[in-house]
Image (spheres, helix red, strand yellow):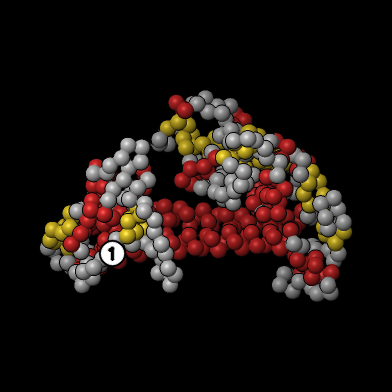
């Protein structure tokens, strides 16, 4: 187990080293915590103890430094707490670990689902695998017949390279509209839900996908054009640096933030035109696909801050598959999105339950087994 020993808001927050057979190193900003008395101390229990507010607060109030707070091994070792019997430690840790295991299972499931959608998009709309199979005299038997028949048996040259025969190539602005978000004032920001949720640059992960940790709330003035709805696609238009890790990537606005929200000026809201066969879920996969993202992000410019101009939402050209095929992919991508949202919501509920149980279990207010007694202990003695 490691324990963070510097870094502002994460001072005192623990993490487990994966038990995967690999060798890990830690730098001077991390403290390694080793449980010595394993006959009396359960390592998982110590991990959850380090997650407690009491432990975190103890490190904060004794920390040194001005701009960057620091603690030391001695301060970690001097933390005092009530230590229950080994049986009760194991019982407490088992309850909390079960919740964390389910949260981790949901995370892995979501990663698998999202990878499936990305892989299918790459196969159908970038590599044109079913077309190439038929071109080589092989039928894509892994597809149902109705879907396989939507792919032609040949490729043809186009302005963006070989594409399936009969599929059109159009500019982006023939199929989508993009709007820049609200240039907000800092005094309108809120720490709670008294304002509207405002999706911003920190709401999109590097590489794409929605990042819940980045949500803000805003109670200032805005215009109707600054509103968006669940299911809308947002695209980042700003990045510090020029690695293109964030700029031009997309996410779908989740429904958990209610029927309407705002988006900041660092974000484009991108919607398909009514005449277009595309859907937000199709477009999100396109913007996040490495090949297409390379073309889109290539429009970015700037000196210190990299910016993505509106040209990137208008000038690139894209291949237009048949409506029926786009609908088939959209149905799958939407199903993935809804399942991912459901898993994330369940994980948030489980995390709240874990956080509520943690202090009650550690204090003995809620008991799960073992003896009723607890002895005073100090981390450095264990």
Compared to residue 320, the image places residue 196 above or below, namely above
Residue found at the far front of this picture: 28
Q: Is residue 309 left or right of residue 229?
A: right
Where disc 1 sits, the SS reads loop
Is 200 left or right of 141, judged from the image as shown? left
**In the drawing, does residue 282 fall left or right of residue 137?**
left
x then y, percent, for residue 234: 61, 42
Q: Quadrant of residue 122?
A: bottom right
Number of numbered discs visible in the structure rendering:
1
Q: Residue at x 42, y 68 (%)?
A: 23
In this view, the residue in front, 70 or 271, is: 70
> In which quarter of the view is residue 104 placed?
bottom left
**Does residue 267 appear in this view?**
no
Question: Residue 367: image x %, image y %?
Answer: 20, 61
- Residue 183 can be seen, yes or no: yes
The quadrant the C terminus occupies is: bottom left
Q: Quadrant of the N terminus?
A: bottom left
Above or below 119: residue 61: above
Instruction: Report the side of 248 relative to 18 (left or right).
Output: right
Residue 333 on image: x %, y %: 63, 56
- Say which residue label 1 marks: 34
Residue at 76 percent across and 57 percent down: it is 324
Which residue is rendered at x = 41% and y = 62% of the image? Answer: 25
Residue occupying image coordinates x 39% and y 56%: 27
């Amino acid at each position: 187990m490691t324990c963070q020993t510097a870094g502002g808001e994460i001072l005192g927050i623990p993490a487990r080293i994966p038990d995967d057979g690999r060798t890990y190193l830690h730098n001077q900003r991390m403290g390694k915590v080793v449980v010595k008395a394993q006959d009396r101390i359960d390592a998982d229990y110590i991990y959850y103890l380090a997650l407690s507010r009491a432990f975190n607060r103890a490190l904060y109030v004794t920390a040194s430094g001005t701009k960057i707070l620091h603690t030391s091994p001695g301060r970690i070792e001097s933390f005092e707490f009530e230590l229950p019997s080994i049986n009760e430690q194991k019982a407490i840790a088992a309850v909390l670990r079960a919740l964390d295991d389910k949260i981790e299972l949901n995370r892995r499931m979501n990663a698998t689902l999202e990878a499936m959608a990305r892989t299918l998009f790459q196969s159908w709309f970038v590599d044109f695998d079913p077309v190439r199979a038929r071109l080589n005299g092989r039928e894509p038997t892994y597809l149902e017949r109705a879907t396989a028949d939507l792919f032609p048996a040949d490729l043809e040259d186009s302005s963006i390279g070989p594409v399936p025969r009969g599929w059109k190539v159009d500019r982006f602005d023939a199929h989508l509209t993009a709007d820049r978000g609200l240039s907000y004032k800092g005094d309108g920001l809120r720490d709670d839900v008294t304002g509207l949720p405002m999706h911003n640059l920190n709401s999109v992960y590097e590489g794409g996908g929605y990042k819940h940790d980045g949500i803000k709330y805003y109670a200032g003035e805005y215009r109707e054009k600054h509103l968006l709805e669940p299911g809308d696609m947002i695209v980042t238009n700003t990045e510090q640096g020029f690695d293109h890790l964030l700029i031009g990537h997309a996410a779908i606005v989740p429904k958990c933030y209610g029927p309407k929200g705002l988006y900041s000026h660092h974000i484009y809201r991108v919607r398909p035109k009514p005449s277009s066969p595309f859907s937000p879920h199709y477009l999100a996969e396109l913007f996040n696909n490495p090949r297409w993202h390379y073309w889109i992000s290539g429009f970015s410019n700037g000196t210190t801050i990299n910016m993505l101009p509106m040209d990137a939402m208008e000038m690139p050209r894209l291949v237009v598959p048949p409506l029926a095929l786009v609908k088939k992919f959209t149905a799958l991508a939407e199903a993935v999105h809804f399942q991912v949202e459901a898993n994330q919501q369940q994980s948030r509920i489980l995390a709240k339950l874990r956080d509520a149980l943690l202090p009650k279990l550690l204090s003995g207010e809620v008991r799960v087994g073992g003896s009723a007694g607890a002895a005073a202990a100090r981390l450095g003695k264990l």
